[in-house]
Image (spheres, rainbow, N blue to C red):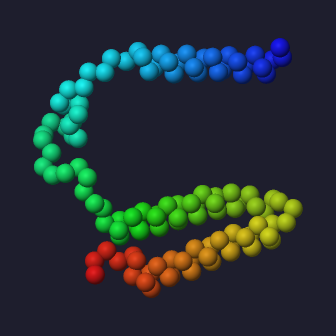
């Protein structure tokens, strides 16, 4: 057998043994405190399944969108060292323009306002 087959068989055997041991080894003794929705010392006042506001999800999605924009534009300072830095800056500008237009659209639609 070659080295890759041996490593694959060891990895499969080890993961199988670990999965079986982790399934059968722990002792599950649930009690009232562990099954309660809060374990901070007081009884819950209301239901733990309260609905969230749609505005909360909209702001969360906008935050993730602009956070992703920062992650996409982070390697931009090293773009001038490529063979065609002009195309790199063109695509970065296109991303920024697209996100700016989206932000203006959300602003005009009233999606960034909490209270009406």
In this view, the residue in front, 3 or 17, is: 17
User: Picture quarter containing residue 89?
Assistant: bottom right
Residue 3 position (above or below residue 46): above
In this view, the residue in front, 97 or 11, is: 11
User: Picture quarter containing residue 91?
Assistant: bottom right
Q: Residue at x 20, y 37 (%)?
A: 36
**Image side of residue 44 versus residue 52, left or right:** left
Q: Residue at x 15, y 52 (%)?
A: 46
Quarter in which the C terminus is drawn: bottom left
> Residue 13's x, y, as percent?
63, 17
User: Picture quarter containing residue 32?
Assistant: top left
In this view, the residue in front, 50 or 91, is: 50
**Image side of residue 63 versus residue 83, left or right:** left
Residue 78 position (above or below residue 102): above
Q: Residue furthest bottom?
A: 108
Q: Residue at x 12, y 49 (%)?
A: 45
Residue 109 position (above or below residue 23): below
**Image side of residue 93 versus residue 50, left or right:** right
In this view, the residue in front, 23 or 116, is: 23
Q: Residue at x 69, y 61 (%)?
A: 76
> Residue 99's x, y, as percent?
58, 74
> Residue 82's x, y, as percent?
83, 60
Badge count: 0
Q: Residue furthest right?
A: 83
Quarter in which the N terminus is drawn: top right
């Amino acid at each position: 057998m070659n080295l890759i087959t041996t490593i694959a068989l060891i990895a499969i055997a080890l993961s199988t043994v670990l999965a079986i041991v982790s399934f059968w080894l722990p002792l599950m003794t649930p009690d009232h405190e562990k099954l309660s929705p809060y374990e901070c010392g007081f009884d819950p006042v209301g239901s733990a399944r309260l609905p969230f506001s749609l505005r909360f999800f909209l702001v969360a999605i906008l935050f993730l969108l602009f956070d992703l924009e920062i992650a996409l534009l982070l390697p931009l300072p090293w773009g001038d060292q490529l063979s065609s830095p002009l195309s790199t800056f063109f695509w970065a500008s296109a991303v920024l323009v697209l996100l700016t237009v989206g932000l203006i659209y959300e602003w005009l639609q009233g999606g960034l306002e909490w209270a009406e």
